[in-house]
Image (cartoon, rainbow, N blue to C red):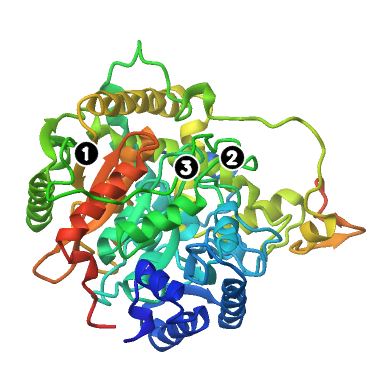
Amino acid sequence: MNLSDLSLTQAQALLQKGDISSHELTLAHLERITALDGALHAFLHLDGASALKQAAAADARRKTQDHPLPLLGIPLAVKDVFVVAGMPCTCGSKILEGYRPPFTATAVKKLQEAGMVILGKTNTDEFAMGSSTENSAYGVTHNPWDLERVPGGSSGGSAAAVAAHFTPAALGSDTGGSVRQPASFCGVTGLKPTYGRVSRYGLVAYGSSLDSVGALGRSAADVAAVFSAMAGRDELDATSQDVPVSAVDLRLNGERPLNGIRIGVAKEYFIDGIQAEVEQAVRVAIRQLESLGAEIRPVSLPHTEYALPVYYLIAPAEASANLARFDGVRYGPRLTGQAMWDMFTRTRGVKFGEEATRRVMLGTYALSAGYYDAFYGQAQKVRTLIKRDFEQAFAEVDAIACPVAPTTAFKIGAHGDDPLAMYLEDVFTLPANLAGVPGLAFPVGFDKARLPIGMQLMGRHFGEADLLRLAHAYQQVTDWHWMQPGRV
Amino acid sequence: MSLTLQEVEHIARLARLELSDEQKARYREQLSAILEHVAQLQKLDTASIPPMLTVFGGEDSHLRLDQARPGLSATDLLQNAPEQEKGQFKIPPVFE
């Protein structure tokens, strides 16, 4: 058995029994990355020496403890939008080339304290803006299921790394679908928690009213372990919520463990233009949840069609403010000019990539004098309507099931110079960010090109454990999540 | 809805972005198409709907006490500075 093929939960069991060491486990993953990442480009930064040092520390720590922490010695890849002291942080952008952060993000720090071994940083669309990793200034990541296709984005490096067995788990960020859509495209499980559930301190900000920190792994059980170790209030993030986090209870009883759970199916998520195989696989998966005891009910989220325009005003508006800090003064490269203003405009004009520039421009326009009410103000009001849709639906059901994305992974370059076509990839994931509710993506089948299809479950605020239980129940009777790409 | 070249230049100036003529022409076209798409929000009557500013209303933020406490050192913060002098970030003159 190759140790890199172990899931987080499997590795955990073998580590606890003493059958394997963290050193062996980490080394197996490093060897696999070294052999295969030339073809995938999932990692932007890999630090094997540091990882082996962390693994040795974990092995030493295990010997001194009667009840070692559950994640002790397990490798983790971190999307390159989180700062980790001692590792570069580029956010996939030339404007942060060479930046060495002097501090560590809270989510990463909690996982380090839990004993996880940080392998390195994974590729991302520039500042997490994109759905394919094609917007990374450091080159695209390839989908392990088909190297000519994108892994999704923006957490495409993390999703590809999990799918390729480079790591049992990875961190991602999700502002409009950036954990769930790549999880779906790469056939892995990915959780976007409730807004405010996981501290964003040290996550480079994109859209502050939408950004959430999420986890990717091979199964709901794996994701649950990482999620519960990093969730919770952090006084360094004023928006992190003071809601207790307990270990997610995945125990299931009987043959119909989902008895009493009501799952809503909304017609607004099965629209024209959706790939037929995607719709079919998701509908089959919903029937399987029903056979596990869940009650399926129709619900309606009538303002779903407005999520895309609302998101593409609010997120760029917030991004235009958040990206104002990149000006060549405190970090990153600087292009000189005669006066300070020339330095700002030249540094930003040259070092920001196309999509970041486009969103900063769009957001600046939406916030500018004379347009604020018509664009940003109106978007905030429609956002209220979208949130109310969810409140009404969750009065009747416990979860909503739908596809993660309208299609499976598309070819690299397919959306070329058409940003709007790319934005449409996010149509089913944006609403959860706008309403602040959690969303979980997991594999439910393949299309005829043997590309993974993902289903999404959305839940009430702070209802991550319910979603993880549902997916876990599904994964006990199916094996889509164990499928492995054969081409890497 | 179509942006003029002057509007594109105005936005770029506000956002402190130096753009080439080719970029200006491309963004003019792409941003016009995106604005056309988002303009569909105008057809909704939202006169009685309050704006959603944050996810949990006014309860999003928990402010800590305004008390000084240790943070990152000036040396740590300056380690990435493109230019520095006497323990401070150095920039070109504000006025030429």
Could you say where residue A464 lies in the image, as x and y percent from the top left? 36, 43
Horizontal arrangement in the rendering, residue A95 relative to residue A342 (left or right)? left
Query: Can you tell which quarter of the image residue B45 is in?
Result: top left
Q: CA distance from mark 1 to mark 2?
A: 42 Å
Could you say where residue A327 lies in the image, as x and y percent from the top left? 66, 53
For mark 1, what is the residue?
A400
Horizontal arrangement in the rendering, residue A236 relative to residue A154 (left or right)? right
Query: Can you tell which quarter of the image residue B66 is in?
Result: top right
Q: Mark 3, mark 1: which one is toward the viewer?
A: 3
For mark 3, what is the residue?
A245
Could you say where residue A364 lies in the image, as x and y percent from the top left? 51, 38
Q: CA distance from mark 3 to mark 2?
A: 43 Å
Query: Can you tell which quarter of the image residue A445 is in?
Result: bottom left
Viewer-proximal residue among A19 and A451: A19
- SS at badge 3: loop
Horizontal arrangement in the rendering, residue A481 relative to residue A54 (left or right)? left
Residue B14, which numbered label? Answer: 2
